[in-house]
Amino acid sequence: MNNSTRKNTKPAPAPRGGNQDRRTVKKKESTLDPRLFVKKAQPSGQEGFRTEKSFADLGLTAKLLQNILTKGYQTLTNIQEQSILPLLQGRDMMAISKTGSGKTAAFLIPIIEHALKDPRNYTALVVTPTRELALQIEEEFKSLTLGMSLYSATFIGGTNINSDHQKLQRKLQVIVGTPGRLLDLSDRRELDLRKVNTLVLDEFDRMLDMGFVLDVNKLVNRIGKRDQTLLFSATLEPGQKKLIDGLLSNPLEVKVSGGGSTNENIEQQTIHVQEGQDKFDVLADLLANPELEKVILFTETKRLADRLAKKLVQAGINAGQIHGDKSQNFRNRMIDEFKSGDIRVLVATDVAARGIDVADVSHVINYQLPMTMDAYIHRIGRTGRAGKVGHAITFVN
């Protein structure tokens, strides 16, 4: 991809409204109807999740295909079938797809092919709302590029910015990061965003929810002209259309079944905590069932996450917690222990749990009601992945 053919000359549109002073905002209670959280699973299985199209049919570079097959991928998921070939042709794309749909590989495979054609001059920038998601995208990139001499790095908050300087001394084909850290490096003139060919905005809806719209606009404007822009979102609100139109040029629009709604593979139910009942005792009784093998437990506050994790450990249940007040190293360790099975219950807040990609989460428990339906969709999307049946349980007072 050469820079003389770049498109997307439009600057990002200015955001509407300003930032609220969070200290003056009174804590709200969820107004969601608990009946929304009850739904029988209608599992599609692997048949509905994967297509019959083989990766071998895509004409990919032999080493990339070998790495894909080594990872155990044989056939494409729905989003991969709809997006990989158009992205190889250089199309912009807006994709609405639920979590766990295979979207990371859907954009990384075309990026790798583009990078292999001109590794000295190609740069892709993948912007994510959370540190965990950024780290997992880079992990996927590394596994797909074994033996290829393509390089990547992750730039996220909570890490030493001086170490980022060392990473940027090497030519990187893929840069993954969170908006704030990427802007910091750009401000320091250590990261030249004008060299970006492909821009990926992953989990765009959550970036807006987390108040990153100003940072995203700054990044886009500093990149300027680029060959390709890809935008992935689990949901799409009507009010976001004008903003998205300013980012994309004649995009392919892809919507995978389930995007913007709850996963059909998830059995959803509520547990009503009666007046006088101890809510933690109800939780402990629930976790006495060995079928709850690998559980993410959601709370609305960091303080409650800490308290619940401590009480679970005291009750003999292996538990850990992640939230925004924990260091990045601590959060990484908790996720690794959760993946390995050393931790059975991971207590998390919404923001910290974004990007957790663990294929075999058996249950998601909402200890407190989420504030929005969008948050609920993202929470329970941690289970029921890759065609498997998952379970979501929501506590209702």
Image (cartoon, grey):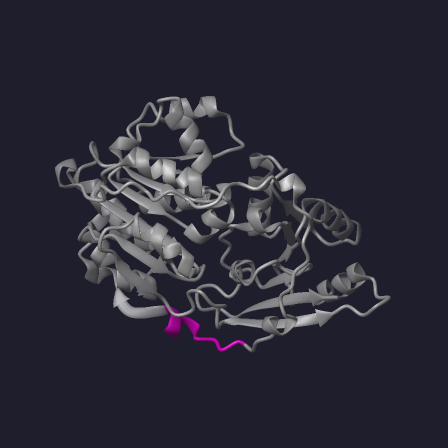
Q: Quick one: 9 or 311, which is closer to the camera?
A: 9
The residue at the point 70 percent across, 65 percent down is 395
Q: How many marks?
A: 0
Q: Is residue 331 visible?
A: yes
Residue 143 among those drawn in magenta: no
The residue at the point 75 percent across, 52 percent down is 312
Residue located farthest toward the left when viewing the structure as drawn: 4
Toward which corner of the image does residue 295 lie, by quadrant?
bottom right
| Residue 136 horizontal side relative to residue 394, left or right | left
| Residue 266 horizontal side relative to residue 93, left or right | right
Q: Which residues are magenta?
A: 41-49
Q: Position of residue 290 (x, y in %)?
A: 68, 66
Q: Position of residue 60 (x, y in %)?
A: 20, 53
Q: Is residue 168 above or below residue 42?
A: above
Q: Is residue 186 above or below residue 54?
A: above
Residue 47 among those drawn in magenta: yes
Q: Position of residue 202 (x, y in %)?
A: 39, 49
The residue at the point 31 percent across, 26 percent down is 170
Q: Is residue 267 above or below residue 334?
A: below
Look at the image and tell me in which quarter the N terminus lies: top left
Residue located farthest toward the right when viewing the structure as drawn: 276
Toward which corner of the image does residue 158 lie, by quadrant?
top right
Q: Is residue 67 visible?
A: no
Look at the image and tell me in which quarter the C terminus lies: bottom right
Q: Position of residue 191 (x, y in %)?
A: 34, 27
Q: Is residue 143 above or below residue 151?
A: below
